[in-house]
């Protein structure tokens, strides 16, 4: 019994000199890793038009069935996106969303990206259904978040991606 107590005291004494791992959350925000998948954003192009063309690819590929959208045709008088159609209604239910990123992969226009926001708490269930008005970037803001895998997993375009490409090339000879 004394042996176990001494082992516990040794482990405790090793940790006394270490820096604590806790942070003072509301005052200090945690720095998220580059591959973190947070709240979704619907992006706009350089002319301020929505990039979403209402193709339903994100809703089809979502394993949790968290995305709902209704598409409508663009008219010459009222143009919302660069394509023939736009998403008239776009909703993501964050109580269902598992933040897998499949919707971002499926988007052919890179309209849907995942940001770094993780503070999405509420007391009401209805507050977790984010509508298009919340998801769509404002005109003056451009979300430059790209999916980690769009550039072969390389966030800083260093020489590591060239090494990975060389490893993937088939070997000549045999």
Image (cartoon, helix red, strand yellow):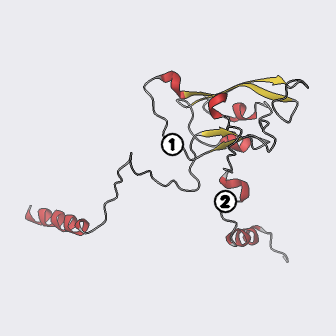
What residue appears at the point 17 percent right and 62 percent down from the top-left corner? 8
Taking the view exactly as shown, the residue that stands out farthest to the bottom is: 173
Tell me the residue that label 2 is attached to.
153
* In the image, residue 14 above or below residue 55: below
> In the picture, residue 87 is in which quadrant?
top right
* In the image, residue 78 above or below residue 168: above
Q: Position of residue 128 (x, y in %)?
A: 53, 28
Tell me the residue that label 1 is attached to.
118
Taking the view exactly as shown, the residue that stands out farthest to the front is: 140
61 relative to 64 in the view: left or right: right
Q: Position of residue 28 (x, y in %)?
A: 40, 51
Nearer to us in this view, 68 or 43: 43
Confirm or deny contact between disc 2 and disc 1 (CB under 8 A).
no
* In the image, residue 106 above or below residue 31: above
* In the image, residue 64 above or below residue 151: above
Q: Position of residue 103 (x, y in %)?
A: 68, 39
Q: Position of residue 84 (x, y in %)?
A: 88, 30
Nearer to us in this view, 57 or 31: 31
Q: Residues within 10 Å of mark 1 (few under 14, many from 20)?
A: few
What residue appears at the point 38 percent right and 48 percent down from the top-left corner? 25
Taking the view exactly as shown, the residue that stands out farthest to the right is: 76
């Amino acid at each position: 019994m004394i042996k176990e107590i001494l082992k516990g005291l040794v482990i405790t004494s090793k940790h006394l000199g270490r820096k604590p791992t806790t942070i003072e959350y509301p005052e200090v925000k945690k720095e998220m890793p580059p591959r973190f998948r947070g709240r979704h954003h619907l992006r706009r192009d350089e002319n301020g038009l929505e990039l979403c063309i209402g193709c339903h690819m994100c809703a089809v590929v979502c394993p949790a069935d968290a995305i709902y959208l209704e598409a409508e045709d663009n008219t010459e008088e009222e143009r919302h996106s660069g394509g023939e159609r736009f998403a008239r209604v776009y909703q993501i239910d964050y109580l269902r969303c598992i933040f897998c990123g499949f919707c971002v992969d499926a988007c052919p226009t890179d309209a849907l990206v995942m940001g770094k926001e993780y503070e999405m708490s509420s007391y009401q269930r209805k507050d977790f259904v984010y509508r298009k008005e919340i998801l769509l970037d404002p005109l003056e803001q451009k979300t430059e978040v790209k999916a980690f895998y769009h550039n072969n997993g390389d966030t800083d375009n260093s020489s590591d991606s060239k090494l990975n490409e060389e490893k993937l090339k088939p070997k000549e000879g045999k």
